[in-house]
Image (spheres, rainbow, N blue to C red):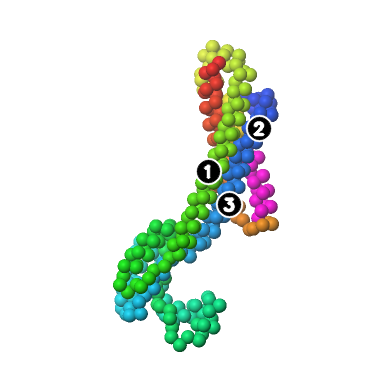
Amino acid sequence: MSYAIREALAAFRRAPLLTGLSGAMIGLSLFVVGLFGIVAHNIRLVLQQVEERVEVVAYLRDDATPQVVELITAEISSFPEVAAVEYVSREQALANARVELEEFRTIFGELDVNPLPASLEVHMRPGMRSADVVRSVAERIGSYDVVEETRFGQEWIDKIFVLRRVAAVATAVLGGAFAVVSILIIGTAVRMAIFARRDEIRIMQLVGATEGFVHRPFVLEGMITGLIGGAIALPALYAVYQMLSGSIIDLAWLPPAWIAAGIAGGALLGLGASAVAVRRHVREL
């Protein structure tokens, strides 16, 4: 192993420009993924806050008796998707409307008859706030005879999950595109290193060197190149984050687990690209 490490480090001295280009491309890949990762992470935080407010509101008929309301409240509370059910009387609904809808405060204050129905506010459990789950619960609640209508903000829920999917797909596509370019550059660097040392490799093969012994320095070189890319991407990404967060909008920094995964991903990208390239090109000697 010491031989492999020594030879891998020597390769950087032999071709510093190509090694630097390989590391820079991996760094660029990780940088782009990191930028979209910051966007995706902050969208995720915002969506979590919005999702916490996702609820089903069931408007009750005027002839619903307290006994029936209490019964269906208990039944809805037993749904596995439901965290809590809150009964809102007609009087409370009117008081809430006067507070929350300031533009209609005068109108609500002049009413002789309360036009607002009583309702049940159904709060969903964490992890049970997807569009399909909320829609299913709303339909089940709407099947009760005393429920006149259910609402759950279907359009907003659909938009929330569309935004999440778009952010994830954009990150994967752009990061993948730059990763492919990085793989090609690393493969070129490995090929040049192999042909520069082809005589040495042939001698090692003639004296019985194993395939792993020959391949190991090049694979380690690729892994170290990937780590260099991570070392390039992280400070550049943090600098951009500081500029955006301080001047445009308050952003949250990436979670430590995401950062560790990104650096490990760069190392694995370099290792994998080198492993494939060295296996292919050594056979051409």
Q: Which residue is mark 1?
A: 172
Give the mark nearer the N terminus: 2 vs 3. 2
Residue denoted by label 2: 21
At x 59% / y 50%, what residue is drawn?
A: 38
Amino acid residing under circle 3:
Val
Name the quadrant of the N terminus. top right
Q: Residue tagged by mark 3? A: 39
Circle 3 crowding by C-alpha within 10 Å: few under 14, some 14–19, many from 20: some
| Amino acid type assigned to the residue bearing label 2 in the image | Leu
Sequence-wise first label, 1 or 2: 2
The amino acid type found where label 1 is placed reads Ala
Q: Nearer the viewer, mark 1 or mark 2?
A: 1
What segment carries the magenta color?
227-245
Residue 85 shows in this picture:
no
In contact (CB < 8 Å): disc 2 and disc 3: no
Label 1 environment density (alpha carbons within 10 Å; few <14, some 14–19, many ≥20): some
Position above or below: 61 against 240: below
In terms of sequence position, does the residue under pointer 1 or pointer 3 come before the other?
A: 3
x and y percentages locating residue 254 in the rendered image? 58, 50
Quadrant hosting residue 88? bottom left
